[in-house]
Amino acid sequence: MSIILKNNAYHVLGLDTMASQKDIFKRSKEIIKRLEIDDLPKYDLDLGLFDNFRIEELVKEATQKLQTPKKQIKEYFFWFQIADDIDEQVLRFIKSKKYKNALQLWETASEGESAKAYLYKKNLAILYLLLLINEENKEYLQDSLLLWKAVIDSEKFWNYFSKIYKLHDEQTTSQEIVVNFRSNISGYLADIYTELHQLYEDPIYINEFQKVFSIKSEKIEKKILSPAYTAINESVEKLENMNVSEDGMLDEQERKEIKELLELIQLEFNKLIDLGFHNDGQIKKMGDRAANGVRTIVLDIHNNLEDIEFSKNLLRVAIAFGGTESFKAQLEQELAQIEENIKHENEDKVSLEIKKFFKTNYLTFENKSVEYKKKRISYKDVTGISWYATKNSTNGVQTGSKYNFNITSEKDNIEISFSGSYSGEDQAEENFGKIAGISSGIMGPIIIKRFISEIFDKKATVTISSLNFNNRGIYKKKLFGGIEEILWSDIKDMPELDQGEAVVYKENKKGEAEAFEIISMSINNAVLIPELSKECLKQNDYYGK
């Protein structure tokens, strides 16, 4: 039940909005004295819509509200102005429960754009809300919102309201108080429609309000959104902490737990969508947070266990959760890579022919490892990757390209170099693209996940060439001592790979992007700098809340 309307000070005291401070004190004392002898008073202005609203605590609270200018204007606005014969006739209809007659009379009187018509509109909107408290009626809901929108947006109404309010106000209310109240009116209305949502447990009250006003009040944040955020975050954190590959297998209990957590997350998002918040920036951010949590499980299963099909299905769920289009696009690319990996899985392995002079070797990507020249490295043991291409030329004429690829672990490394020239250039370039794509799609995320754990969980520093990554940002040592640093919060332009180099940007004094550091892609893990930076920014945003 709407507390703002039921506990309105004028309603509790049974007074007209034109009542003086003397009338207010007199009525307050009278009610309290009668309540002390269990004599419940009734007055001519009582509507007969509520019970148990005239108690000592609320009477004292009502008196206090009408003594405070900032509170009095709210009570005045959200109650009927009984100013003429039409208003008095409507009041009689309400008391005799002839609600259709009351609505019809004010509807007719409110037609037009006169200042008086807007006061009838406000009275009519309040009556719709009072009736909605006792009856679910979608027409009343729609009509009330349209009336409030018309009233709140009308300069004519506010000019007239300000004049009549100051005329009836003995506390010499300043124009600043009227202006401040006007700026908060949509929030007060949001609270009323939130209470109706809670009364009927129907999202339509908030959903329809959002369509008209597009704001979130403190009550919506506290009662609706905050519990949903908490439930989503708790479920996501459980997903992130599962570490399903720790024992080397994905058992049925783990599958069940993942499914239940995803259902809980989906349930909360469905509630928010039903309430009309699907385009809200914070909800989209929560969507990305949830999607990234699912992605954590996907990478763990995909990279460390054999159930690639299950990881593909989970990634589809992550895409559904994703809030921003950019993150969804990233997940779509990863899904395409996993589907490609499944295709390779069905073909048992991906084997690339590497020709060097008159000798041919094969680089083979299998389910859990990569092999070249009888050297085999498991993906989970990979500590670094690099790849780069250079152009070959003779007397200034390009004759082909040279491609280099390197993968390292703590115990071993695979180093590959091959050239493309003349008719073999296209095949060499295609092989290079496949090597880069597969290694970035499979081994890159494993290395980045390890780096993120070092940076944000262990508060350690990860070094790639001259660049150092920590939970504050990226820094490098200056030539003559000291460091130069870019905080994560200050990064405007993301690092990128460009013409064989990883480029990290900073903002200069003119607000323009300039190179902070340039590292050759031949350096171990330089190719991961853009994706590592993106993940660090996400983690920094999460831990920095």
Image (cartoon, rainbow, N blue to C red):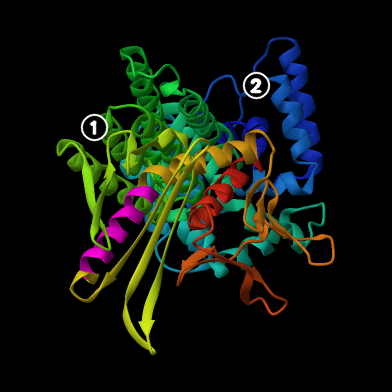
Q: Amino acid at mark 1?
A: Glu
Q: Which residue is mark 2?
A: 41
Q: In which quadrant of the rendered view does residue 452 lie? A: top right
Q: CA distance from mark 2 to mark 1?
A: 72 Å
Give left or right: position of 476 versus 138: right
> In terms of depth relative to the viewer, which is nearer, 149 or 379?
379
Over which residues does the magenta segment extend? Answer: 426-440
Please report the residue visible at 75 percent of the width from the left and 41 percent of the height from the top: 66
In-image side of 320 versus 44 (left or right): left
Indicate the position of residue 369 as horizontal and vertical percent values: 34, 36
In the image, residue 497 lies at what x, y percent? 47, 65
- Which of discs 2 and 1 lies nearer the camera? The answer is 1
Most foreground residue, 464 or 80: 464
Along the line of sight, which residue is nearer the eye, 257 or 31? 257
Q: Is residue 423 magenta?
A: no
Majority secondary structure in the magenta region:
helix
Residue in the picture at 60% in, 46% down = 541
| Neighbours of disc 1 within 10 Å: few (<14), some (14-19), many (20+) | some
Q: Earlier in the sequence, mark 2 or mark 1?
A: 2
